[in-house]
Each structure stands twice: as structure tokens, then as C-alpha cells.
Amino acid sequence: MIVSITDIQNEIIDEFSMFEDWEERYQYMIDLGKDLPLIDDQYKTDSNIIKGCQSKVWVHAEMNDEKLVFTADSDAIITKGIIAILIRVFSNQHPKDIIDAETDFIDKIGLKEHLSPTRANGLGSMIKQLKLYAIAYQTQLK
Amino acid sequence: MFNVENIRKDFPILSRTVNGKPLVYFDNAATSQTPQQVIDVIVDYYSNYNANIHRGVHTLSQEATDKYEQARKKIQTHFNAKLAHEIIFTSGTTHGINLIANGFSSFLKKGDEIIVSALEHHSNIVPWQMLCERTGAILKVIPMNLDGELIMTEFDKLLSDKTKLVFVNHVSNALGTVNPIEYIIEKAHGVGAAVLVDGAQSSPHIKPDLQALNVDFYVVSAHKMCGPTGVGMLYGKEAWLKKLPPYQGGGEMIAEVTFEKTTYAELPHKFEAGTPNICGGIAFGAAIDYMNAIGFDTIAKYEHELLEYATNKLLEIDGLKIYGTSKHKTAVISFNLEGIHPYDVGTILDKLGIAVRTGHHCAQPIMDFYKIPGTVRASFSFYNTKSEIDVLVEGVKKAKTMLS
Ligand SMILES: Cc1ncc(COP(=O)(O)O)c(C=O)c1O
């Protein structure tokens, strides 16, 4: 049984609502970043890179039993923490559910600023990239 | 007497908060803040005498033209140019550099050489690469040492009678190194090459005497000198400006137009096609007045104090490394915490209301030289204080604790 994307998002919103201030929120993201299982080095290639001016992000996707599994990495730890959250939401899901998923939970946990395209940290296009992978694999499934 | 608390009252933005904390603005090398005296001039322009210049016989146009030309004179006096028409208003440093690079297209031939420095803003290397592609000229680079200084013995070796132009910044934006432009100008002239100095980072801290320097071209941006964005100065020696072809065609830059031939206007109008940033030019003049009222010697002395104070305090933090350790520096500190990405440090500092720059500072070659992705850069101005530096130091310590 997979937990639905919406349920995971609600879980995350709940977790974040317990933090008293920005420091707790950031410390949590930093710790998530540290715990993020690293992307396999063979996938840390230029073709898997989302280039930002400030930090780099690598994303790799593969299908496992009709579910799309993402691994990712970044050279900056806060960026990595945000990636960990996105992976928790979108990885191990059916491509169709990924394509259909709403993303307003980002706003609700106060991370919108980090995912703005002008932030130049490589995250701006991350969600778009995840959805593009889903579209590509969805086409294959048909 | 210099009193920083009084000076700060001139800058409305310094009393705002960011993320609930008092703003600590240490991104002065990217753009400086604007004092009320300059804001008032901008408001006055649009409230009282907004008009197009050099064209109308009506009163408003005459007033605007007078103020604009007065601003040119202020800039001339400040930089000690010999003639007012050697001062060309531009949209900023980038525009000035492109104007010269474009003009040199008609002077260069295959095999000629242009020398730039390893400390350049990388966007400013592009116009020279484009120039080389157009003309077949070759780009040479003055290397730097670990302190972030240009190696003059290597520069000497690059010079030859093939050298036609040397382009170097007076002060490096990424590291704050003050380059020995006096030496570079003299040596370059020795082989008959022209010199263009990028003064974007020096002009907020140093008052250069352009005649004494004997430099051929010097470019600055008003927004780094307490003025508005989108306006700057290109200084060129009269003889050079007469020789250079115009850059853009349009109104203002022509004397006479028929379909057969156009005669170009006299300097400076030859290089000022179209309606310029009139208000910006006038406000630039006001910004120069403002800074001179404080005095560049006073500014340099105070900023040096801030630099020393901050350097010592930051170096007390374990694992903090400063990049750019020349003895000749403006008040810029580029640093990293060991094992921590500059972006992460910048993000935490922003949460604390501290504005610094993180990243490669448009100086990718310098970052490649040090083999780092970027740095955190704190750049100080005369309106900053030691207690703000204390806030920075505490912020960096906090970032270190949170991130390691
Ligand atoms: C050394 C240097 N040159 C040129 C520029 C570009 O100035 P502008 O964007 O005002 O044209 C900058 C600005 O960051 C700079 O630091």
C-alpha cells in the first residue's frame, strides 16, 4: 500500500506546524539534508544536473514496479534538505499521481522562497523536472 | 567630524527590518544605498522640471539641460578629467566597456593582442571575446597569485608591440584587491597600447585623478556610489573619443542627416544617442556631491577601520578562511566556512536580517582558481558600523553551529 501524495503532504504540513520559529524549521531541514541518502555517484553527471548560479542539484529517476523512484543530491545542505522533502512526497509513486499532484504544500510550510526561480539555487525547476520525468515514464507505461 | 550615526540618518532604508531583524546591509559591492539627499533630487526632477534635453527652447527643457550638464561638470571635477566632453553618460560600467570594445573593432587586425586580468568580472570578459572573434585579435590574461593579486612580472612578459589594449579593473569585485593600475598604465603606454580601467568597485572608495593616472578610458556605475541604477560614466581622452566611431545611431548623436551621409555631432553627444537617463545623470551628480561632502579620505580611513575590525573578528572563528589577502584591499571580505557551502551560510544570514552576497560573484575564473564553488562576500560602506559587524560575526557563528 502506498501512502498517497496528499497524505504525505499533510503529514509534512503537520510536522512543520510544530516548529516555533525559523531556527527550528531550518535545523530540521538541515538535518534532513544530512540524512538524505546520496545519489549514486554514477548518476551525478552533467546531464542529470539542474544548474543554479548558487548551488547545484542532481536528480536521477528510475522505474521500479510501475512506481517512479527519485534520488537526488546537492552541494548545499539546505538545498539538500528541501530535496529530501520533495523526494519524500514524490518518490515511490505512480507517474500519473505525480503528474496530478498539487504543490501548494510548499507554501504552507514556508519554503516558497527557496523554490522561486529567481533564487538561483537549482530548486526552482526541481518540481517541474520531477513532473517531466513522470510524464516521460507515463508515456512509456502506456 | 565623521559621525556614522548621523550619516545613517541620511539613508532611510537602513532603518527597515528584514525577517523581523534590523537590516544589516553588507552587499555594498553589488549596489550601494541611496541617501535622502539623492532621493530628493530625483523627486525634485520629476516634480518640477522633467523635460527632454538639448532639444526644446522652452523653460523646462532649458532647466533640465542645465542641470544635466552641471552634473557632467561635477563628474568631470570629481574625477579630474581635463574636459567636460570627455565625460560620456552611459547606462553603467557594462555599457561603457561595450562601447569601447565595439569601437576598437575598427582599429584591430588579426594577430593583435588584448590583455585582460584574471580578476575580472566575467561578464566583462565577454565583450573582449566577442571583439577577438570579430577581428582575429588574441586575448591574453594576467594571472593572479594566492593572495588574489595580479602578478606584474607576468604582465610584463605579455606586453609587446602587438598589444593594442589592456583592460583591468581598479578594484576586484570578488576579492577587493586594489590593482596597481599606475604601473599597468605606464607599462602599457610603453608599448603603445591603450588602457581601459573598470572603476566600478574603486569609485565608491577611492577618488581617482584621471589626468595624473594618464589613463585612456575609465568607466563607473552611479549605483555603486550612492546614486541611482542605470546610469554611469565613460571617461575617454579627447583624442581617443574623436577617433572612436559612434556606438549607437539615433537622436542627439548627429549633426546633419541626409540620405547620403550623416555628420556626427561633437563630443560628448556623438556617444549619447537617444534620450538619456536625464534624472539619473542629475542624481549621479548629487551622489558625488554627497560623497565629497563626507570626503573620500574620511571614507577610506573609516572603511579601512571596518575592514580590519571585521577581518580580525571573523578570523577568530575556527575553520573560517578569507579569500583575497592582499595588503591593498577595499572593505570587502570574501570567505568560507570549512566544509560548508556559501549558499547555506548566506541563507542563514538572511534569516538574521544580514544581506551578504553568496556565489561566484560573476568571477567564475577566480573561484576555479581557488577550487571553490563560491564565497560569502561581505562588503562594507561608510554607513556601516562595528556593531553591525558584531551582528555578522555572531550570525556566522550561528550558521556554523546550525550547519555543521
Ligand atoms: C568590477 C565590476 N565591473 C562591472 C560591473 C558591472 O556594473 P553594471 O552592472 O553597473 O554595468 C560590476 C558590478 O557588479 C563590477 O563589480
Image (tube, coloured by chain):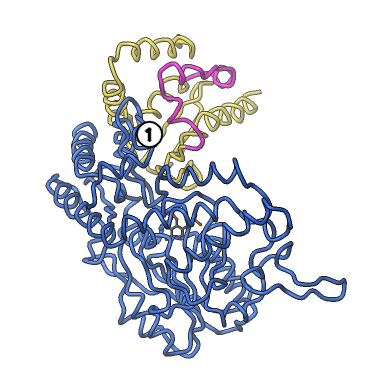
* Residue B250, x across and y down, in percent: 73, 62
In this picture, is A103 found above or below B109? above
Q: Which residue is mark 1?
A: A79
Q: Say left or right for B224 vs A128.
A: left
Q: Nearer the viewer, residue B101 or B383?
A: B383
- The image shows residue B278 at horizontal and vertical percentages of 60, 53
Quarter placement of the N terminus of chain A: top left
In the rendered image, the vertical position of residue B331 relative to residue B11, given as above or below? below
Quarter of the image containing the C terminus of chain A? Answer: top right
- Of residues B36 and A126, which is closer to you in this image? B36
Q: Is residue B157 above or below residue B258?
A: below
A2 vs A95, left or right, is left
Corner quadrant of residue B298: bottom left
Could you tell whether B217 is left or right of A12 in the image?
A: right
**For residue B397, which quarter of the picture?**
top left
* Amino acid marked by disc 1: Thr
Q: Does the magenta portion include A41?
A: no
The hue of chain B in the figure is blue
The chain drawn yellow is chain what?
A: A
Q: Where is residue B315 drawn, in percent x and y?
A: 15, 50
Name the residue located 51 percent from the left edge and 28 percent from the top edge. A127
Q: Secondary structure at mark 1?
A: helix
Q: Which residues are magenta?
A: A92-118
